Image (spheres, rainbow, N blue to C red):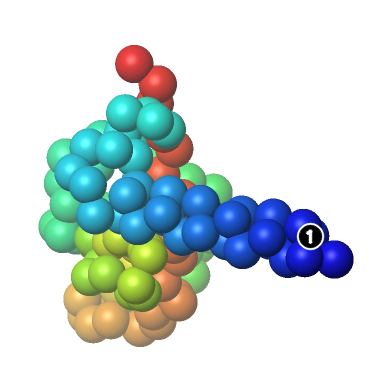
Amino acid sequence: MFFVFLIVVAAAGIALYLTLIMREVPGAAEERFGRLEALPADLGKWRVDEASEETAAAKARGLRREERFLLSEKSGFFSGPRLLRQVRYRSIETNEIVRIEPDQVIKRKRIRS
């Protein structure tokens, strides 16, 4: 029984050590898991969406679809900044914001080098 307890304590210690190393040592996570894909070039700037299916439906209702990508602050102890997509619809005639969609979290992929 003591042997099982010893193994559980050792496994917990190793897990805690690896977690802290991956979080605190610069470049450790990138070396082990790969670096994150590049951020969009127009980060933080609204752009008119011309190519999506939602744009065609919005134009039929007299709206213009705009979107932007933002990098949020750290959201938790072990998580880094998150990439968010924000979408809004403006009236073509008055240029007023008619509707805003909820923020979507975009999962960035890791690229092995």
Q: Is residue 47 left or right of residue 30?
A: left
Q: Where is residue 55 shown, x and y percent of the image?
A: 45, 54
Q: How many marks?
A: 1
Residue at figure coordinates x 23%, y 82% from the top left: 96
Q: Quadrant of residue 41?
A: top left
Where disc 1 sits, the SS reads helix
**Is residue 52 visible in the rendered structure shown here?**
yes
Asked if residue 56 is positioned above or below residue 88 in the image, the reply reads above
Residue at figure coordinates x 48%, y 70% from the top left: 61
Residue at figure coordinates x 61%, y 54% from the top left: 11
Q: Crowding near pointer 1: few (<14 within 10 Å), some, many (20+)? A: few
Q: Which residue is mark 1?
A: 4
Q: Where is residue 95 shown, x and y percent of the image?
A: 21, 76
Q: Is residue 13 left or right of residue 85?
A: right
Quarter of the picture containing the N terminus is: bottom right
Quarter of the picture containing the C terminus is: top left
